[in-house]
Amino acid sequence: MRRAPLTAAFLLAALALPGCLRGAVVDARIAEARASAEALETLGDTEVALAGALAQLAELEGLYRMAPHDDDVLFALVRGWTMYGTLFLADAREAAAREGNDRAKVGYELRERHALERAVGFGLSALAKRGGNLDEARRTREGLSAHCEQRLTSRADGELAYFVGRAWLARSRLAKGDPTARVFEPFVGLVLLERSNRLAPGYAHFGASTWLAGAQAEAKDGADEARRAYEVLLEKTQRKALVVQLEYALRVACPTGDTLLYERLLNEVLGASDPGLDERLANVFAKRRAARALAPEVVAACKAP
């Protein structure tokens, strides 16, 4: 509750400093903000993590005003808004839907869209700094693929591409079935995730591979390939990144009517012990979603087509 005043005080104090000193102070605060973002993902208490995430986003928005071209600020904003949207708000939306609270569901979905669009906006700004005509390149999948191969070349670029791609793909999924929603071409997110997978394949517990497997499962006749991809991911993550089991159940087992696999995977998520600091927050949300997905009426709906 006291974070916002401290942030405002910091920004006002920084503005009063001479140019070089102000830059050093802002750089130090940016580095601290990026480190704290990583620390938040190790928490198992979602309320503490949410409070920290909201305070951090407010502060990062202020830092962005002071240093709009700083790569670390842009990366932290992309990461922060993506995690807020795909974890906290997505979970709240799903919980409201499960409870039959349509009004709350719509409200959370609107906020989720805003968070993801914010992430994408900052992400495009960061990617544009790599040079080339990004707006022209993303008109086609081939053009964007060539652009990414030429302009995104480092592991840091791969980490940025992961969060932008994740936000883009999540926003594309939200828009499905809503004719009033702003259209986000899914191929943009997929191309970015593919490039991330090449530059930083193990980043975020093989996060790019996990999202790509989900996209493959949604493709026509893609279930078998997605099944193989998830099995490989279970080995690579040593079954500690529970989102893999969760996504495997929701995107392959349920749509193909394999209820035995569906229940086994979700029960594995619920029964998993704490694997360590790095996976803690994402695993808490995976357990929440698994519990909702094991409701009898949900399991009964997983029938072979």
Image (cartoon, helix red, strand yellow):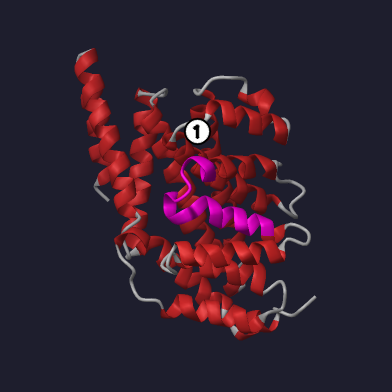
The magenta stretch is: 196-216
Q: Magenta stretch: residue 210 in it? A: yes
**Where in the figure is residue 100, as x and y percent of width and height?**
62, 72
Point 46% across, 68% down: residue = 242
Left or right relative to 83: residue 218: right
| Viewer-proximal residue among 84 and 304 | 304
**Where in the figure is residue 87, as x and y percent of width and height?**
47, 57
| Viewer-proximal residue among 291 and 5 | 291
284 relative to 48, above or below:
below
Left or right relative to 215: residue 71: left
Q: Magenta stretch: residue 207 in it? A: yes
| Viewer-proximal residue among 160 and 53 | 160
221 relative to 302, above or below:
above
Q: Disc 1 residue type? A: Phe
**Where in the figure is residue 46, as x and y percent of width and height?**
36, 63
Q: Which residue is labeled 1 in the image?
A: 122
Rate crowding at label 1 as few (under 14), some (14 to 19) or many (20 or more) other CA atoms within 10 Å.
many
- Magenta region's main secondary structure? helix
**In terms of secondary structure, where does tag 1 sit?**
helix
Is any part of residue 114 visible from this angle? Answer: no
22 relative to 149, above or below:
above
Point 42% across, 35% down: residue = 156
Point 39% across, 38% down: residue = 76
24 relative to 278, above or below:
above
| Viewer-proximal residue among 253 and 170 | 253
